[in-house]
Amino acid sequence: MMTSAETGQPPVAIAVRDLTVAYNDQPVLWDIDLDVPAGVLMAIVGPNGAGKTTLIKAVLNLVRPAAGSVEILGQSYRQSRDKVGYVPQRGSVDWDFPTSVLDVVQMGRYGALGWIRRPGPRDRELALQALEKVSMRDFADRQISQLSGGQQQRVFLARALVQDAQVYLMDEPFQGVDATTERAIITLLKDLRTAGKTVVCVHHDLQTVPDYFDWVALLNVRKIASGPVSEVYNDTNLRLAYGGRVAFLSRDSAAPATAQSVPEED
Amino acid sequence: MFPEVFTDIYSDYTIRNITLGATVLGLVSGSLGTFAVLRRQSLLGDSISHAVLPGIILAFMLTGSRDPLILILGAAIVGWLATLSIMAIVNTTRIKQDASLALVLSVFFGFGMVLMTFVQRQPDAAAAGLSRFLFGQAAAIIWDDVRTMLIIGSLALAILFVFWKEFKLVVFDRAFALSLGMPVQRFDVLLTSLLVIAIVIGLQTVGVILMSAMVVTPAAAARQWSDRLGVVTILAGGFGALAGVSGALISAYTARMPTGPTIVICLTAIVLFSLILAPNRGLLWAWVRQHRQSRDIRSRVVLGDLYWLSQQHEGVDHGHSMAALEAMSAGRVAVDHGLEDLERAGLAQRIDGDHWTLTEKGRQLAVSDLNDEDQDQRDA
């Protein structure tokens, strides 16, 4: 089984076609067409309720679209899911669950392990290596409720790393982390890109988009624009995505971007 | 009473059955209950346990048999029906989860009580024993019951063991489990079925009214003692068995003592003990920690004040009055107790009367405290 990435043809990591998702007759995503080239580090930005999380969930087949299709590395999600890693929103789980950091990271191996088989020494070693990469190895035996927000986020990242995927989908990996952790995470994401992986992040901080990402999709129920940051990340598109209410001008003047960092629920 | 219990367990047929039955029941409902509690389905357990009553009576009415397997089967079917009704109400109407739980509980239980009253009016003597399903009756347990519990219970625990890893992931992080392609909904159904089993297995012994305590309480107590899912599950099973056996035996040896309430009292003792005394999570230790911390802060404040005073005066050893220290802290801390703590730790010493000075060790600590403070300010 050869993917386009392996054959060296113009590779598309994620291809979204005519995707529409609705909750209770209310469209959350409307007729989205989106190509994510392999090997990019892409941000999905847009106001609250724009359907960013839903888009990721639709790609992962976690929500059923009303119409349209998604292909990952030229295959359906069902066929390609062992090449996909997922980092859910940190707040989506109960951090008081009785389990350890190492145990959570090993969950990233469950897909490769298959049914019933328990994680063995090799899985443990992989999990410890992943924790090393996020500077959390010393926390392996900690109970997860003893972690700070940034540490929780790094544990989730380590879990995605042990999935050893080609395509990573991350829902707000920078949400609620301090500046140090944010730098550590972005270094890690850039390393993934260097290793040829594709990384897609729901992102809220409009100011950091040009520094962190090379590809961007602007979303507000419909797709406003997508492409290289240098080409599509401009005031016109931002205003289309966020409406005229907010002043951005993030790169051309000293005025800071203001619509950001609001935790989203959708 | 008690010494003979232990010889009876070996010799007396009834006592042996009660002990064995209560152990199995406690083990199974306690360990399966862990997952119900982690899934926040404690109240669902309560609704199911009340709702199975008509199932028991109907099974009896339809078959005329009091075979435990048939009655448990009837209970399980209606328990499932109740669960489906709750889900259907939440999904199709605007009634919220809590109201639909209460609705199903009361409607099913009320219907069960009507059926029970009806059956007991019949001249058939076989129906007489059915009322023990309300509060449970350990003394009536026979070997057939124990065997049924053993078979169903082992099956349920085997399922839990086999799919351990899958259950853990589905309960902890549903979205991630879905992204791995796990049939999460099927595991939901399986886990809820296990909850139904955890409930119906104890109906004869504990009764429908209090059975949910047997599912929820051991897990709540066990969570206090460990942060590992495996340990919590095993401990919950152990607590369940302990409460089950002691409650069942006490009620069997005491006339007119209903078994269910007795077991629940034993459970209460276990959960209270765990809430207060468990290391880390116990309330007592939390209180001790807080007390220690405030004492520590108090003596650090006094230490800092004493150091500051010593810097203002040339002669370090001439001592400073407690009045000066009290003026400095302006009533924020109890200076006298703080000084006593410092003295005990060898950080300060009394010169004469109420004059105090730092020891060399105390001075070093005060200096390092100040350095830490500077560091914090630089970091901020």
Image (spheres, rainbow, N blue to C red):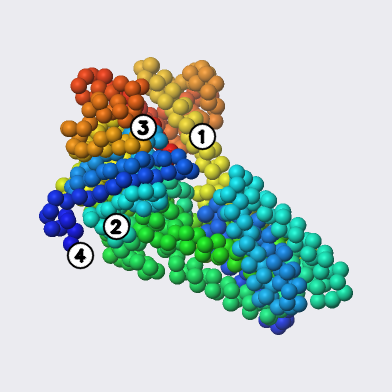
Task: Judge left or right: residue B181 versus residue B85.
Answer: left
Name which residue lies at 63% across and 79% down.
B147
Cβ–Cβ under 8 Å for marks 1 and 3: no
x and y, in percent, of residue B80 in the image: 61, 63
* Residue that label 1 marks: B295
* Callout 3: SS: loop
Residue A106: which numbered mark, if any?
none
Q: Is residue B374 visible?
A: no
* Residue that label 3 marks: A47
Few, some or many C-alpha atoms within 10 Å of disc 3 (few <14, some 14-19, many ≥20)? many
Along the viewing direction, whichever of B161 and A170 lies nearer the viewer? A170
Q: Distance between the Cα atoms at labels 4 and 1?
A: 68 Å
At label 4, the amino acid type is Met
* Residue that label 2 marks: A76
Q: Nearer the viewer, mark 1 or mark 3?
A: 3
Q: Are marks 4 and 1 on the same chain?
A: no
Name which residue lies at 36% across and 37% down.
A221
Q: Are marks 3 and 4 on the same chain?
A: yes
Cβ–Cβ under 8 Å for marks 2 and 3: no
Q: Distance between the Cα atoms at labels 1 and 2?
A: 63 Å
Q: Distance between the Cα atoms at labels 2 and 4?
A: 13 Å
At label 2, the amino acid type is Ser
